[in-house]
Amino acid sequence: MFVRTIEPAFYDTDALGHVNNTRLPAWFELARNDLFRLFTPDLDPRKWRLIMARMEIDYRAELHYGSDIELRTYLSRLGNSSFTVTQEAWQKDELTNVGHTVLVHFDHSTKRAVPIEGALREALEAHLQPAEETSDA
């Protein structure tokens, strides 16, 4: 699991007084940089080997200005050429948001998915764990 801490800025808040929901996709993308480095260590976009196939976020609780937010990133599924990244936002020991992003290992020159094999697969497997259980209230 990769962990990053975000300190919300005042401009991250909205008229309702909490962190705006549009900030989460950006923060989750930033937190995926550690994972992106497994594919492209220098993060050079000319060597990029991924595409996004899907992204969803469950907003479970409000985030607030004035307290750090911990972003936890891990894999919840690893397929042949695609995988699901699960991300959690925690504030004051409360799980506030959960995101799932499907990424595909991709060759941009041939426009085709590429199998995840060898050392890359092993590196991804090290971050594979079950996603947090969803409870219906």
Image (tube, grey):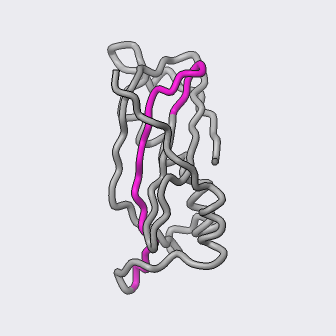
User: Considering depth in this image, is 93 or 36 the residue closer to the camera?
Assistant: 93
Horizontal side of 61 relative to 124 (left or right) equals left
Which quadrant holds residue 119? bottom right
Q: Residue at x 59, y 18 (%)?
A: 92
Horizontal side of 60 relative to 90 (left or right) equals left
**Residue 102 is inside the magenta segment:** yes
x, y percent for residue 80? 45, 73
Q: Is 10 situated above or below 99? A: above
x, y percent for residue 83? 46, 62
Which quadrant holds residue 40? bottom right
Residue interval drawn in magenta: 89-109
Q: Is 17 situated above or below 28? A: above
Q: Residue at x 57, y 37 (%)?
A: 71
Q: Is 135 situated above or below 87? A: above
Kindly report the secondary structure that dominates the magenta region of the rendered protein: strand
Horizontal side of 83 relative to 40 (left or right) equals left
Q: Is 26 situated above or below 21? A: below
Q: Residue at x 52, y 47 (%)?
A: 130
Count of numbered circles in the view: 0
**Residue 101 is inside the magenta segment:** yes
User: Considering depth in this image, is 58 or 110 the residue closer to the camera?
Assistant: 58
Which quadrant holds residue 60? top left
Q: Residue at x 41, y 34 (%)?
A: 134
x, y percent for residue 137? 34, 20
x, y percent for residue 55? 35, 50
Query: Outermost residue, bottom direction?
Result: 110
